[in-house]
Image: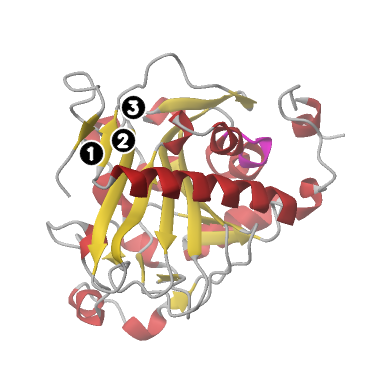
Amino acid sequence: MSAFSAARSADQPELDHNWEVRLPEPEVLRTAYARDGYAIVRGLFSPAEVVVMAGAFDRLQAAGLALGRSFRHGNLLFRLGDDPHLGRILRMVQWPSWRDAALDRVRLDLRFAAVLQPLIGDSLKQIINQMHWKPPGAARVEFAYHQDSRFRRPATAFRDLAGSYVQTGIAIDPHTRASGAMKVIPGSHWLGDLGLGGDGPILQQSMQDAALMAAGLDPAAAVDLELAPGDLALWSPYLVHGSGINTTAADRRLYINGYVRAENCDRGEWAFRAGRPQRLGAEPVLVHYEALHERPEPHFIDD
């Protein structure tokens, strides 16, 4: 039994799914991640576990659409948008773990501690907890080419981005070129912050080859980050990536959780201390919502 199995607590029972055999060798993971700026762990979550996560996506989607407008309560954010084909849609939810216990359990699963330990250690804070939807037929669900480093502000609170931060995403549905899988530029993380995306919201822009060429990148180098349900993708905050529309008949959903070596981040919720999960406290802590302490109450916001 590994240290991670031994540390599994009563609220994280041992599963029939033998996920430990899915873990890559630490040196293999470090080498691939350092070379490409991303990596994939295939089949880390079982089909039954994906069904549970899909149910949470359905619950949060229904709750968000019932609101009718973008809504915030503390760090919990429902971001809605208007689509010319489908009308009102839910684009994303930030910090759904304040609302849904199933999603909260997933973000603290020991699989994250096991996968991330070779990259950023075992004492981690969490700065990203998001759900993304690309419903079939929607026209406005693209994400422009960007680097996640643009969102780590203020810079003084987020130190050593390249060596201390890893973004992860669990595929809930098949991620293919047709369904709007992420497109990534392997090795682009070595170039540092390229200023992609300009000043506008990334989720209100489309992927443009011209943006890559302006940054000195070859659009032909982009590859599709294709995932099966239950696969876990990991990527660097400096990896150039974006995603297009979903042309299939099924949804394309992604559960994103971003972790950071605790000593190099002044913000975020504790996720793991020495590899052990840390539950949310009574009140949210400052992450990216700057007005958290001035306006923590539930309120609608402009779309």
Q: Nearer the viewer, residue 113 or 37?
A: 113
Point out residue 58 in the picture as x, y percentages from the top left corner.
51, 50
Q: Amino acid at mark 2?
A: Phe
> Which residues are drawn in magenta?
108-112
Q: Which residue is mark 1?
A: 153
- Can residue 75 be seen in this snapshot? yes
In percent of the image, x 18 and y 22: which residue is there? 295
Does dot 2 land on a helix, a strand or a loop? loop
Q: Amino acid at mark 3?
A: Arg
Q: Nearer the viewer, residue 199 or 132?
A: 132
| Colouring chosen for the image of the structure | secondary structure
Tell me if residue 158 comes above or below residue 131 in the rendering: above
Question: Is the Cβ of the residue at disc 2 closer than 8 Å to that at disc 3?
Answer: yes
Q: Amino acid at mark 1?
A: Arg
Farthest residue toward the top?
282
Mark toward the start of the polypeptide (3 vs 1): 1
Q: Which residue is mark 3?
A: 267
Question: Is the Cβ of the residue at disc 2 closer than 8 Å to that at disc 1?
Answer: yes
Q: Is residue 199 left or right of residue 27?
A: left
Q: Is residue 180 left or right of residue 28?
A: left
Question: Is the Cβ of the residue at disc 3 closer than 8 Å to that at disc 1?
Answer: no
Distance from disc 2 to disc 3, alpha carbons, whole Å, reads 8 Å
Q: Nearer the viewer, residue 268 or 46?
A: 46
Point out residue 249 in the picture as x, y percentages from the top left corner.
50, 77
Q: Which residue is mark 2?
A: 158
